[in-house]
């Protein structure tokens, strides 16, 4: 069809006959004349008709899909709309065709209306017609195009790795796919292409990337989806800085594309230790100050029991100046409660008075030197609130880091703060005292000796990218020596036989001249979310699921015929059968 | 690391010190001097060392991963290798580092060696080091980049549709994914993004594409994989020719990228009827002639019973001149046997003698007018073989079409023949006489009246793209009117209640101002296969599975813990349990 994009029409086209096709955004009648705003992907144009001459106009309702032919003309003086790119012109209707009528809408196609998310997901195809959601779709498409352009130009190959694989050990549950040709056996959907991208390095690909669909069957907390998309990247003969350089080039390109700003490079880097010490988190948000200060020296000989005991027990006393936040007894209590939820024994607060003295329930326990030390440490000004935690190091900094975010984090994403956290610990201690990997078991240790001698504190060659306090993704220099890989498995408590059974094929691959290699992966959903100023990844995923994994539009997941399951060598458990028989109805999602 | 690509070194760099990292491709010793060919992704360079001075050189074996530093120098007169871009230079070793040793290889990294496919898949990371496979990986990456560039430039949005969906009706079995949060229920993996891309049209996206992973649990015949990749595309306010135009632009761009040739546009178009009549198939190969000729008029009054009976029964007599193929009694018998396998009653053959007469077992039944008619129809030359089938129309042309391919199809893919087949039948008759869809149930009929009055012969608005006799993909103008969609379901025997239960959510979406739309999807695997001159899609898929869906490298699929299944509300059937207990071993694929 010979269509003119609605949003493209300008005064230079006055006198031309055009055809626009799109949706009825709005219709007003004035003195027997109908004004219809027609919207398509390019924008909006006003069309004007005499309903007496054009019967169809009388029937037009919101979101009818129509095609209009007419002559472009100037809007009468005083009726121009400067807010609209097409605001100086209109189309005088000569022919009008209803392509598809529309039922009464479940909600208005308008960004200003606040709609229940379940209704939005139930009619996602209407939700996506809203300008904000349309912009998010376009932004995501432009983001992935910018990523590919950037990596293409650097000689990366995009390689598709399989999605029907066997289970991989990445810390979340695998989603399974029953095999029909081998009844009773299962494929797993990939949590990431980790092992396959390492195999591509063994295969000599040297520079790989993929925008890959990944799957994690986690209990939906925070803002997770069963399926998500990541940029996955790996390079051979590479060290950490090669990876950081490539990823920075990509992130800068996406920020330029979506926000038209130039992010300075290199991004700031913090070791994990420094990040924890200064910001109490491994994903610090640098858009605001209020760094954590070590007060242990000041209170080294304090007569205040809480501080003294913490220090005596090998702990620490740390504080932050959160600035002139509004302060009340109620707020103090709420923050103390929050600190306790986070595992702290309590929270000490101080307010800087006009005369420079410190008001605090514990002030009476502190001597003049301590108070002066505090003032020096923070350079605090009148009205500032200081929060102090005394505890084991990690707990103290994490509590202060969380309160820092709670109190100071800006709501939007106007400012962008990219940074790297490097030198993560290699292992983490589990609650039962056993050791597990921090990143994944294919991450290289900074030092083999350190790994063997002090696994609890050993540093890895892993790194994270952080944007505005959101972890975008992580990567590492990988182990390329099968003997080192075996040693890591051993420390993780994976015995040789288990390692052979689960990863034998991978360990074998490492024995054929594997190049040193390193890589990274970051979540496209999260990156686009932050750059678009959204606060949930569901806003930038075209068809997301609810927190309980349901699609309110299609009703997925659903019950399946027994015969179909039998072909796969599986059958429902009794518990599932009774859940089904108790009337969880087909195609009727019940969660909210 | 500061690496110089091995394949990039030229005489202009003589005297420079460089470091190359890569794999030992070959090593020769000559009079105490070692010559080592080092290969990386960019090519090969010869390095030369005195093993006495460089101990490590003595230990180098095939496919060791090494790093070499040395001075670029001219090769001695007479030892240059004109076949190698780096053939005029070599590197005199000053430092050598073994990055990773390599075990003895299961097969040589060499295109000239013929290796069992199972061994290749078992060590795919080594197979991919072979130049041909590396070239296929690069070609695929360049193909998808060219596709995206072409569609980006035309304003298409790439939109990711979900892969955990509910079952869709596309003629193959769905692969299922059990849900843990809704125990006993299942997601399906998409056979294509069909319904979601139509929803994107409802959502106002107007121009959509996606390079999408799709899943079909078919019995592996021909050359199929459980997962495959397609370019999926859809446009609103579009008619067939808009789709053909967009897809042609993409195919031409990919052919230019991979083969450096300019395919003329528009591609030839054949209606399905014409394609069947002339080539006996809906995916004709135009690289050779031998079109089917209708001989019914010539034999209208024949006294040869086979022809007479076929015509009397409403059938047809058709023939092809397959040219001067070698002919013998044995070959004639074999072709007749093949025709019978295909369902024909038999096959008539004739050979054109030097004097222009026709030699054939049936010549004696034909009169002079018939023989002259044959000669006129084919313009056959001495030595040509003519094959004739007399049967129902479809069977006759299909048998001749198959024999045409069997006898004349060229082995390689040097020449490229792109074409369109349009105006496919809307429905197909099943063996039990019921009616099913030819393309999919969302395809628009050419005429509503024809669909209602003569569903068996009604023409659809579907079309296929064909390259060298391989169906690349298919598409159609879609139904955008929910009432038409209901009528199609009705003809397909899907009653209103079933339609509502299975597709109610989709039919509802069509009721909110759905634009007319049309689209297409083609297989990336097949396109790259043909353009790379390969004869199996497994050669252009980085990590394919065997015909029985097994990955010989990782052993997927595998048995899974009962506890993990229980969490999903499923358990193995007794049949599967006994298969497991009878020792189909974990991680030990047994198929070939």
Image (tube, coloured by chain):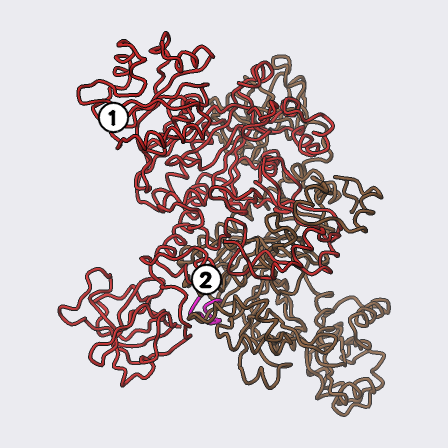
Chain colours: A brown, B red
Q: Is residue B282 visible?
A: yes
Q: Nearer the viewer, mark 1 or mark 2?
A: 1
Magenta segment includes A242: yes
Q: Position of residue B364 (x, y in %)?
A: 29, 14
Look at the image and give the residue range highlighted in magenta.
A234-244
Number of the label disc, if any, that sits on residue B384:
1
| Residue at the outermost left position | B77
Q: Nearer the viewer, residue A115 or A471?
A: A471
Which residue is painted at 44% across and 52% down in the image?
A: A149
What residue sits right under mark 2 in the picture? B123
Magenta segment includes B440: no
Which residue is painted at 49% across and 69% down in the image?
A: A508
| Residue at the outermost bottom position | A301
Q: Is residue B266 visible?
A: no
Q: Nearer the viewer, residue B502 or A6?
A: B502
Please check whether the numbered discs 1 and 2 fall on a single chain. yes
Which residue is painted at 69% across and 63% down in the image?
A: A409
- B386 on left or right of B241: left
Q: Position of residue B169 (x, y in %)?
A: 62, 35
Q: Earlier in the sequence, mark 1 or mark 2?
A: 2
Q: Nearer the viewer, residue B186 or B290?
A: B290
Q: Secondary structure at mark 1?
A: loop
> In the rendered image of this protein, does residue B336 appear above or below residue A438?
above
């Amino acid at each position: 069809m010979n269509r003119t994009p609605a949003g493209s029409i300008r005064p230079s086209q006055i006198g031309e006959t055009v055809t626009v096709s799109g949706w009825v955004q709005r219709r007003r009648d004035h003195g027997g004349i109908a004004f219809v705003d027609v919207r398509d992907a390019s924008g909006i144009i006003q069309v004007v008709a005499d309903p007496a001459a054009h019967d169809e106009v009388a029937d037009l309702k919101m979101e009818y899909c129509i095609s209009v032919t007419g002559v472009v003309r100037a809007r009468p003086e005083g009726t121009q709309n400067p807010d609209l790119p097409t605001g100086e012109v209109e189309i005088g209707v000569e022919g009008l065709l209803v392509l598809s009528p529309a039922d009464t809408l479940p909600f208005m196609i308008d960004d200003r209306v606040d709609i229940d998310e379940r209704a939005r997901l139930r009619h996602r195809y209407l939700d996506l017609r809203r300008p904000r959601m349309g912009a998010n779709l376009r932004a995501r498409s432009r983001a992935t195009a910018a990523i590919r352009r950037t990596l293409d130009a650097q000689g990366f190959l995009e390689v598709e790795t399989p999605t029907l694989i066997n289970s991989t050990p990445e810390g979340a549950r695998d989603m399974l796919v029953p095999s029909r040709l081998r009844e009773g056996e299962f494929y797993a959907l990939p949590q990431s292409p980790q092992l396959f991208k390492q195999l591509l390095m063994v295969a000599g690909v040297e520079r790989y990337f993929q925008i890959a669909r990944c799957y994690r069957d986690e209990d939906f907390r925070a803002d997770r989806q069963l399926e998500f998309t990541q940029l996955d990247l790996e390079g051979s003969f590479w060290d950490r800085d090669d990876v950081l350089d490539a990823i920075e080039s990509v992130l800068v390109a996406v920020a330029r594309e979506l926000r038209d700003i130039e992010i300075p490079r290199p991004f700031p880097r913090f070791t994990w230790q420094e990040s924890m010490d200064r910001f109490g988190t491994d994903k610090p948000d640098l858009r605001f100050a209020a760094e954590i200060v070590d007060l242990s020296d000041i209170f080294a000989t304090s007569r205040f029991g809480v501080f003294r005991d913490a220090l005596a027990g090998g702990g620490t006393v740390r504080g932050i100046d959160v600035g002139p936040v509004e302060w009340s007894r109620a707020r103090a209590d709420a923050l103390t409660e929050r600190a306790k939820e986070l595992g702290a024994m309590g929270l000490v607060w101080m307010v800087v008075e006009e005369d420079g003295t410190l008001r605090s329930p514990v002030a009476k326990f502190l001597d003049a030197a301590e108070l002066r030390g505090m003032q020096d440490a923070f350079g605090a000004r009148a009205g500032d609130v200081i929060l102090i935690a005394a505890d084991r190091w990690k707990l103290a900094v994490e509590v202060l880091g969380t309160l820092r975010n709670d109190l100071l984090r800006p709501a939007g994403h106007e400012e962008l703060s990219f940074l790297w956290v490097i030198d993560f610990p290699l292992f983490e201690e589990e609650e039962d005292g056993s050791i597990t990997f921090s990143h994944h078991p294919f991450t290289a240790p900074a030092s083999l000796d350190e790994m063997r001698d002090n696994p609890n504190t050993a540093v890895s060659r892993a790194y994270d990218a952080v944007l505005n306090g959101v972890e975008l993704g992580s990567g590492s220099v990988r182990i390329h020596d099968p003997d080192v890989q075996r040693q890591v498995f051993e420390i993780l408590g994976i015995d040789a036989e288990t390692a052979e059974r689960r990863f034998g094929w991978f360990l074998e691959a490492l024995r054929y001249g594997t190049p040193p290699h390193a890589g990274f992966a970051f979540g496209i959903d999260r990156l686009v979310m932050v750059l678009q100023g959204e606060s949930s990844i569901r806003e930038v995923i075209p068809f997301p699921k609810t927190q309980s994994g349901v699609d309110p539009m299609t009703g997925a997941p659903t019950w399946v015929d027994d015969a179909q399951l039998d072909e796969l060598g599986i059958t429902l458990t009794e518990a599932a059968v009774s859940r089904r028989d108790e009337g969880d109805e087909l195609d009727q999602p019940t969660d909210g």
